[in-house]
Amino acid sequence: MLQNYIKLAIKVLARRKFFTFISLFGISFTLMVLMLIASYLQTELGGNPPLSANKGLVFIPSLSLQYFENDTIRDIDTIVDNGMTRFDTTSQVKKRERPSSVNNSGISYNLLDRFFKGMENARYYTFYSSNVTYDVYINNSKLTINTSLTDDSYWKVFDFVFKQGRPYTLDEVKRGVQSVVITESMAKKYFGHVDNLLNKEILMDDKHFKIIGVVATPSNSAYYVGSDLYMPYTVYPQQGDPTDYFGGFTATFMAKEGAGTEGLKKEIKNRTAKIPINKPEEYNYIETGPVTFSELFAQQIMYDEDPAKSQRNVLLILISFISLFVLLPVLNLINLNISRIMDRSSEIGVRKAFGAGTDNILFQFVFENIIQTFIGGLLGFIFALLAIYLINDSHLLKNIELTINLRFFVICFLISLFFGIISGLLPALKMSKLSIVNALKQNNI
Amino acid sequence: MIRHIFKLIWFKRKSNALMVLEIFLAFLVLFAAASFVIYQLNILSNPLGFETKDRWMVSLDGIYNKDSADAAVILDQLKSDLENSPIVEKVGFTNSIAPFLNNSSRTSNDDMGFNISSYYSEVDRGFFDAAGLKLMRGRWFNEQDQLAKHRPIVVNELFLKNNFPKKDMLDSIIQLNGECKIVGVIQDYRYQGEFQNPENFTFFLSRHTDRTNNCILLEMKSGTPTGDQEKINEIIKGATKSNSHIIKVLESERVNSSRGRWIPIIALLCICGFLCINIALGLFGVLWYNINKRRSEIGLRRALGAHNSDITKQFVLETLILAFIAMGLGLIFAFQVPLLKVIDIDNSIFFKAMAVVILLITALVLICAYIPSRQASHIHPAKALHED
């Protein structure tokens, strides 16, 4: 029977080509856009290397030193006492709600080393400095190298895919050896190829760095992993005042397996409260604002001091945008289907006269519609692949390489199925309720 | 005629409701998109305030960590070396709140009884020419300013407009990080790029030997090739004895910084364009179908003496009224945004967006209704009546 339905569906699609075109155009483009959005979110948040463990990560992106001024509020009550005026004065000191000065910046290695080591809820932790840039001149042209200065546990927190070689070890970090790990895209820019690069040297900042590892270029844009070159932070000794809290470092913690990030965040907040205030005339409150990876992503789109609120807002906007965006083509399709289905009233009349039940008819039309959306979905999938190829090829989204995998395919399939059922149900319901006499009579057009 | 049309619409209220709902939703989506795009274009239309053509910028790393006396020697050496270079026209020093670096600092003060807040940067005297700022009134910092009793500041026009409307504040002394004297007004300095919201801005004066000055803006001889960066690189390496600095070409920085903001705008416009086409095609299909189903009605009207254009007018009017009902509903919702101040931006943007969307939808509906109605009006009465 399903075979019959498929045959019928294809026949119907071929009958009125203009209407078929309108339907398929709407379906395929809507699904294409949805698939692109799915691919983007999947690339950015889907837990691909080097961020496979992103659900268990907590970041301290920066340190905030804030100064809250105290307001002295003086209430003066005037009291008439025996014909004499008397003043009753009360005063209270209150911290203002908003800080009068806020300084945000990266964190110094010393501060992280002193206060955020060996936390109970953290499995691994890493302190590193991203996006230190160096200009290198090769063959008369300039190459800007984004460099990360990291410790050895960086490679445990972020699971980079090593194509060649290995990461640097704790021992190498301690000795401050000039060994580096580079990405494939950096290798292509510097050497022009990616083969046999181990033990070759890169000349940067008048130093010779030995390549000990080559990693696959991360496909997402996360700032914390998106460098060209990684080296032990000990290559450059920390300059400046060792008691300074600000510096160029950030920290990432990985929660214990199955423990969730809440405990980790709380522990970071507790530890933050213990940091002594060393310049009370400049600030009197320290904030570290630990965030999870998805909150970090949300904060980049819509910043809010409270990371959870930021995440909620972004989610709300995304959901309302997508539902509005899907609702329109669905409505359009329902409108069109209701008109089109009238064509087939005589067919329904005949089937009903020969004993088909309402549910049979309903199933047939929804099924036909699903076939139609799958054809549209397939077209949309092809368009999406094409668009992804074009976007990646032209580097339209900086640092982001949109990815396609099985999960993406399943998401696309589910989107198409949902779309088909939603847009087919209402017209089919209307049609299946048609009485036989009316259905047989209305056979014009 | 109108009453008759309303009656017709009411008779088919069920299928019309779907069409109204569709146009209503389309209105809301397009309204949101149009507001966003108009808002961004509005920002874009403001002048950048400084030049990027033939401008390079050097960011020094590690100057701040040096002893201030050492840093002064290095920076002084750098200034004279760069000025003596044959490819450099002008040299200006600024702190790290410099073009396209995504840094910003803000200060606020309410000692005068009301709150003044302003973003600010510290620059040396050479910065004006090197950046190509546009002076509107007053003057730029001069030699005597270094020793002046009140700290001299140069502000942008928006600063005066927001804080001291309708007053000539030139040479006045205000409270902003201490007592400051406004010596000049510049057009603007939108250092984050073309999509930066116009903000209050203040320049404070510093010496070029100050170690906070870790960015150097260079005006190059016009047409200097980017390959010459290596020459500048050598000069800086010679003076700082280190390699930790970056040279940026401001023109390409400007393009890059804007590119990230253009992508969502263009993506949104593409999606909306597709939605419009989709809706138009759908409307066209449904109208074409419905009008064809009403052949007998058309035949009857034609037989009773209605002209071609009367038939067209009837159907177009019917669809237009539906569209206006839908847009009216949409407007009720859309008006809440500026009325309730849901989003704190200029109200005129929302009104412009409403006008644009109403025009767009009306045009779409007109086209989609006109073509099938015209076709229908050519139906021969005898034929139409015979079929029934």
Image (tube, coloured by chain):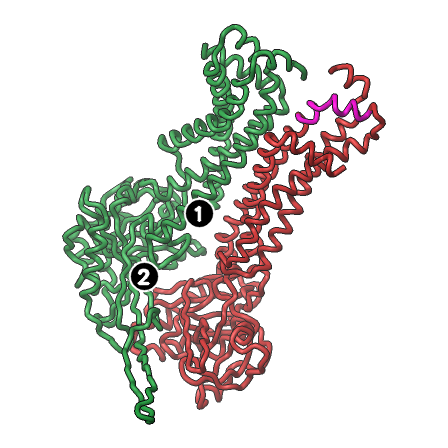
Residue drawn at x 37%, y 73% is B239
Q: Foreground: A100 or B305?
A: B305
For label 2, the SS is loop
Q: Amino acid at mark 2?
A: Asp
Q: What segment is highlighted magenta in the picture?
A: B290-302
The subunit letter for the residue under badge 2 reads A
Residue B109 point in image, percent of width and height = 41, 78
Seen in the image, is B16 located left or right of residue B251? Answer: right
User: Crowding near pointer 1: few (<14 within 10 Å), some, many (20+)?
Assistant: few
Q: Quadrant of residue A219?
A: top left
For label 1, the SS is helix
Please give the label number shown on residue A317.
Answer: 1
Residue B85 point in image, percent of width and height = 48, 72
Q: Which residue has dot 2 on it?
A: A206
Q: Foreground: A163 or B359?
A: B359
Q: Amino acid at mark 1?
A: Ile
Residue drawn at x 43%, y 54% is A139
Chain B shade in the render: red
